[in-house]
Amino acid sequence: MRKNLAITSLQFVAVDIIGDILFWPIWWYTKGLVNAVLSTGRNIKEQAEALGIGVWLRNIFTPMFGQYDIEGRIISFFMRLIQIIVRTVGLVFWSLIYCFFFALWIFLPPLVVYQLWYNAQGLL
């Protein structure tokens, strides 16, 4: 017996939509969470590379502008030390922002469910 194309299509769409709705929380806290962790780590690493803290640390005792006298060395050291401190504070700031968005990823679905439940109670 041949099935109607419309009925077959509706069955496929219904099963697909219901399956996606039921599978979504599982994906969110398994594969999606792994992707979020990797993305957060990658973003923090890219920000650290963009700030170049490692380059400043490697060259902290190298005199700037080829001034090898004692004054040039002292000025170069403290200038680089200030740069390292400021850039590290910036990296900590960006890391906290990335971690906030990661925490938002974890707590957003339960918060949405709670809000839906809370507001549904007000309608009854």
Image (cartoon, rainbow, N blue to C red):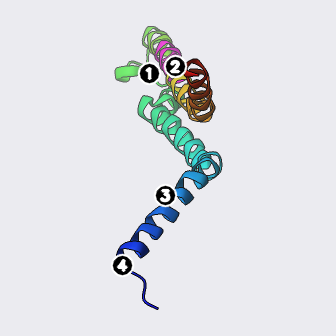
Hey, what amino acid is under mark 1?
Answer: Pro
Name the residue: 61% across, 45% down.
33
The location of residue 82, given as percent across then percent down, is 49, 12
Magenta includes 84? Answer: yes
Hey, what amino acid is under mark 2?
Answer: Phe
For marks 2 and 3, the one nearer the N-term is 3
Name the residue: 56% across, 28% down.
116
Identify the residue position indicated by label 4 in the image: 5
Hey, what amino acid is under mark 3?
Answer: Ile
For marks 1 and 4, the one nearer the N-term is 4
Determine whether label 2 and label 3 are within 8 Å by CB.
no
Is residue 10 visible in the rendered image? The answer is yes
Q: Say the numbered circle drawn on residue 63.
A: 1
Magenta includes 83? Answer: yes
Identify the residue position indicated by label 2 in the image: 93
> Which sits in the foreground, 32 or 113?
113
Label 1, residues with CA under 10 Å away: few <14, some 14-19, many ≥20 = some
For marks 1 and 2, the one nearer the N-term is 1
Identify the residue position indicated by label 3 in the image: 17
Q: CA distance from mark 2 to mark 3?
A: 40 Å
Q: Which marked residue is nearer to the observer: mark 2 or mark 4?
A: 4
Q: Which marked residue is nearer to the observer: mark 2 or mark 3?
A: 3
Name the residue: 52% across, 64% down.
15
Hey, what amino acid is under mark 4?
Answer: Leu
